[in-house]
Amino acid sequence: MSYRLEPVLHRTTIEERIADLGREISRDYQGKQPVLVCVLRGSVYFGVDLTRAITVPHLLDFISISSYSQETDPIGIVRITKDLDTPIVGREVLIVEDIVDTGLSLHYLIRNLKTRSPAGLRVCTLLNIPARRIANVPLDYQGFELPNIYAVGYGLDYHENYRNLRDIFSLVKEET
Amino acid sequence: MAVITVSRQFGAGGELLAKKLANELNFRLIDRKAIVEALTEMGLSPQLLKFDEQATKGEDAEKRQRFYLTALHEHLLTLADKESYVLVGRGGQFLFRNRPDAFHVLVCAPFNQRVQWVHEIYNLEKSPASLLVREHDRRKKRYLRQVFDRAWLDPEVYDLVVNTKTLTPQGAAALVRQAANFFLERNLRESTPVSARPPRREQNIADKQTPAFMHPSEEEFARMLNFYHIPWQYEPKTFPLQWDSEGRVTEAFSPDFYLPEQNLYVELTTQRQKLVWKKNKKARRLKELYPEVNVKIIYNKDYQHILESLGID
């Protein structure tokens, strides 16, 4: 099996859209000092650029949850592998995701963070692939809606590869 | 329970059709005889029973008629909670008009045809037969207007209107039977309380016993849902998609999973993309027949993307 990369979003398109999102978020969170919860690891690239586009004071924190794998024992359940350093009770929280496809991990994260009684909880994702959605999740801010492709680059990986690419590509398998 | 109401124009053969239908469905037939028996048993006087299907004039008569109707309607409504039956006349189409478990039939035929049949059956000359048919039609119209303030022959009141002249009484009976079967099957599907349904192959986080999955990809999907705390049921429902002329289901669709929290049915297909047209067709048909049902087909390619995004190949 070999792969080829087809360009989907150029870095300038991504930059422009992030600037828009930054303006939108800055307007909505005026005087609220939100906590931006960046979901490790893919969202780091987007999260960092987004904070630079946000003009209101805010706090950046990171969270990581285990993802499903075939090696997981049959009663394995999702858990937090790196928790927030900041208490969010009574705070405005904005979850920052690189991509929302099935919505399964985000669904868990929202439920988990809600139990900590934040004042508000919203979601910002760079990419949205509704064609793969299984769990209903509310998306308050989204960069781009994509068709059912396998996206890599700008933090998104395939077996830990391609995260460092500045543009976003579709990974296409080629039968050999 | 189900009630099939049969309204009929005089001489159109509605009584015979209702009797045949009740026999074939093994439902009780509620006609004049059954009503008189039941209400007499309840202690109603024979003087009151003469108000059965009769319009009245005068204050006193109206008062007595109301008394009779209260008893009759009470009896019919109570009975409908206990058993299924075929009701002949009595304005059943209006009495049960808002009940989802009621099916309303109107049996009619052109005036001349009914006169002809009355002439043959009652051994009457054409002229008195004609008078009788006209009189009965007028009386029924007045009765239903007086009691329910509704127009008897408004087609919107009925689920099925059959003409016994063009269809013949036998043809009309067969058609009503078929429609009733269709309705009863639908009614059963939609109204059976969950507790009364046969046990399903159900599964969720709380109950870890593994059902017999048809395909390894389904088992994998179930594990993934468990991992993310998403409750699910395995093949909990079958949606009929096609029926043959006798009401038997010839095509159906049982999506693999139901996610109650998402109110979403999920069908996993591991077939190659080229072969999925049949499943797509089923999904389209499902959407047509059950527009309120959310179903998502996850194709092999989508599923691979999901697994790959989790680092699984």
Image (tube, rainbow, N blue to C red):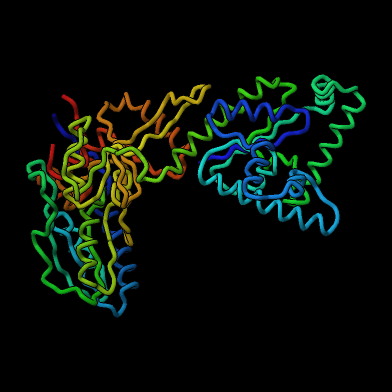
Q: Is residue B19 left or right of residue A57?
A: right
Q: Residue furthest right?
A: B127
- What is the quadrant of residue B172 in the picture? top right
Q: Looking at the picture, how far across and down is residue B210, in whole percent?
A: 17, 39
Q: Looking at the picture, how far across and down is residue B69, in whole percent?
A: 70, 51
Front in this rendered view, residue B277 or A7: B277
Numbered marks: total? 0
Q: In which quadrant is the C terminus of chain B drawn?
A: top left
Q: Is residue B4 above or below residue B13?
A: below
Q: Looking at the picture, how far across and down is residue A136, in whole percent?
A: 31, 53
Query: Residue at the spot x=72%, y=27% of the render?
Result: B13
Query: Residue at the spot x=17%, y=70% of the render?
Result: A60
Front in this rendered view, residue B272 or A2: B272
Query: Residue at the spot x=23%, y=43% of the render?
Result: B203
Q: Is residue B123 visible?
A: yes
Q: Is residue B151 visible?
A: no
Q: Residue furthest bottom?
A: A31
Front in this rendered view, residue B15 or A2: B15
Q: Looking at the picture, how far across and down is residue B84, in whole percent?
A: 53, 38
- What is the quadrant of residue A43 in the picture? bottom left
Query: Residue at the spot x=18%, y=37% of the render?
Result: B219
Front in this rendered view, residue B241 or B236: B236
